[in-house]
Amino acid sequence: MDRDAFRRASVRYGVLFLTSVLLVAGFWFHGTFYALGLGPLLLVGGFATFTILLVLRITWTGGAWRRSGGDLAFRPEQGERLKARAASLNILPMGARVPAVGAVANAVVPGSDRPAARVVVEDVQRSLYADVGEAEARAAGYDSAEDFRRRWEAEHARDPREIVLFVHFRVEDSR
C-alpha cells in the first residue's frame, strides 16, 4: 500500500472512530434531553443523527452528495489517457455494468492492482455498432473508426446491429 492510500485510509478510519465516540457520548447526553420534552429531543436528536450520517457518507464516498458507482472497466491502453485526463468516452458492450449517471466510479484497467482514476459518469447513450464514427472512436482512444472495428471484432460479435454503450465521463481524480 502506498503512502497516499495509507493516509486516506487512516483519515477515514480516524473519522469513523471519532464518530463512534460521538455516538457513545450521545447516549450519555440523551438522558438529559428527556427533561426538556419531546419537541427538543426530536429536533436536536434528529439534527445530531443527520449530521453523523452525513459525516459517515462523506467519509465513505468522499463526497456529500455524490453516489458511489462502483467500478467502470477500461481497456489497458486507456490507462495512460485516464492518468493524463485526456479520456472522456468509453465504448462498452450492451451487457456491461455501468454506474448510474452522476455516480463516481473507479476506473479499473485489467492487469492493474489499483484503479487508474476516479471518474464521474456524465451520460450513457446507446448506439448501433455500425454507427460508431471517427469522432466517437477517437474520443474513446482508438486511432480511427477502422481501428475500433478491428479491435472490437477481435473480442466481440461482428453483428452490425449490435448495440454498444457510449459512456461519457469526466476524470475527477487520476492516480
Image: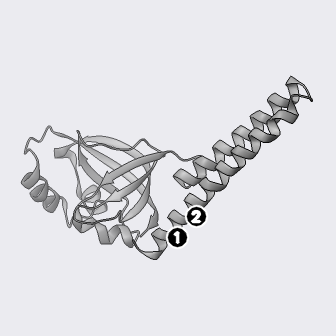
Circle on res. 11: 2
Secondary structure state at the residue bearing disc 1: helix
Q: Residue furthest top?
A: 38
Q: Which quarter of the figure is the C terminus placed in?
A: bottom left
Q: Is residue 95 above or below residue 166?
A: above
> For the point 47% across and 47% down, which residue is it?
68
Give the left or right position of residue 101, taking residue 166 as reference: right
What residue do we see at 60% from left, 53% from top? 16
CB contact under 8 Å: marks 1 and 2? yes
Residue corresponding to mark 1: 7
Q: Amino acid at mark 2?
A: Val
Q: Nearer the viewer, residue 120 or 23?
A: 23
Q: Residue 122, image x and y in percent?
A: 45, 49
Label 1 amino acid? Arg
Q: Is residue 115 above or below residue 35?
A: below
Look at the numbered disc 2 and give the secondary structure of its residue: helix
Residue 61: give x, y in percent of width and height: 52, 51
Give the alpha-carbon distance from disc 1 to disc 2, as whole Å. 6 Å
